[in-house]
Image: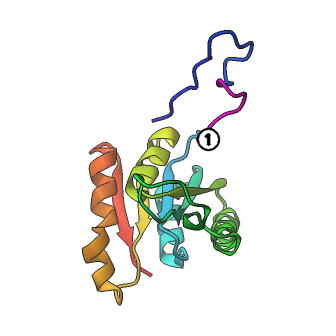
């Protein structure tokens, strides 16, 4: 859900807040048929092929989540944000996926989001782009304990986007 910024009393620009700048970047809203989402892992070729098949020539969006660590109740600490190296890795993952999709003949866009709650962020991106299918890249099966601790991302995304959007999980 995208919330439009409200104007502070006495400001000339409707998108400016009290201190003169936006709090966050605006959510991209180009319409797409398929959203391919990864929680910081490399997007496998199987997910890209499935996205190409489901899109049927329509645009495809790619979202990679850079993990924000720490508590939302604590003080802000720059050490909890993703480092430049981690952001460069995410940028590389998205660029490779977009290049592969465009090589397959569809228009595509990429986005990197920083979030503590990846399911909520993926659902917001899917709703903003009005997608019909969401493909979620599951982590490697060797890290089984991680799924127990964090939960099943595919089920959480499916619950948040509703029954109108089809959600599928792809393992590398």
SS label for mark 1: loop
Position of residue 109 relative to residue 82, above or below, is: above
Q: Is residue 18 magenta?
A: yes
Which residue lies at the image location 52% right of the left edge and 77% below the top edge? 44
Which residue lies at the image location 50% right of the left edge and 39% below the top edge? 128
The quarter of the rendered structure image containing the N terminus is: top left
In the rendered image, is residue 57 in sight? no
Which region is colored magenta? Answer: 17-28
> Where is residue 39 shown, x and y percent of the image?
47, 67
Position of residue 1 relative to residue 161, above or below, is: above
Position of residue 134 relative to residue 144, above or below, is: above
Residue projecting furthest to the top: 10
> Where is residue 67 shown, x and y percent of the image?
50, 65
Tell me: 96 left or right of 70. Answer: right
> Where is residue 36 shown, x and y percent of the image?
50, 61
Neighbours of disc 1 within 10 Å: few (<14), some (14-19), many (20+):
few
Which residue is more in the foreground, 54 or 155? 155
Q: Which residue is mark 1?
A: 24
Which residue lies at the image location 40% right of the left edge and 83% below the top edge? 140
> Predominant secondary structure in magenta?
loop
Name the colour scheme: rainbow
């Amino acid at each position: 859900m995208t919330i439009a910024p409200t104007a502070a009393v006495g400001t000339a620009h409707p998108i400016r807040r009290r201190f003169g700048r936006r709090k966050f970047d605006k959510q991209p809203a180009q319409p797409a048929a398929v959203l391919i989402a990864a929680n910081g892992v490399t997007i496998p070729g199987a997910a890209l092929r499935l996205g190409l098949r489901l899109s049927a020539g329509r645009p495809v969006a790619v979202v990679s989540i850079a993990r924000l660590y720490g508590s939302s109740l604590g003080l802000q600490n720059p050490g909890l944000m993703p480092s430049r190296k981690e952001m460069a890795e995410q940028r590389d993952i998205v660029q490779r996926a977009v290049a592969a999709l465009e090589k397959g003949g569809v228009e595509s866009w990429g986005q990197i989001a920083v979030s503590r709650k990846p399911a909520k962020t993926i659902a917001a991106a899917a709703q903003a782009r009005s997608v019909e299918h969401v493909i979620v890249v599951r982590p490697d099966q060797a890290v089984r304990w991680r799924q127990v601790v964090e939960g099943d991302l595919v089920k959480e995304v499916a619950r948040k986007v509703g029954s109108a959007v089809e959600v599928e999980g792809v393992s590398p």
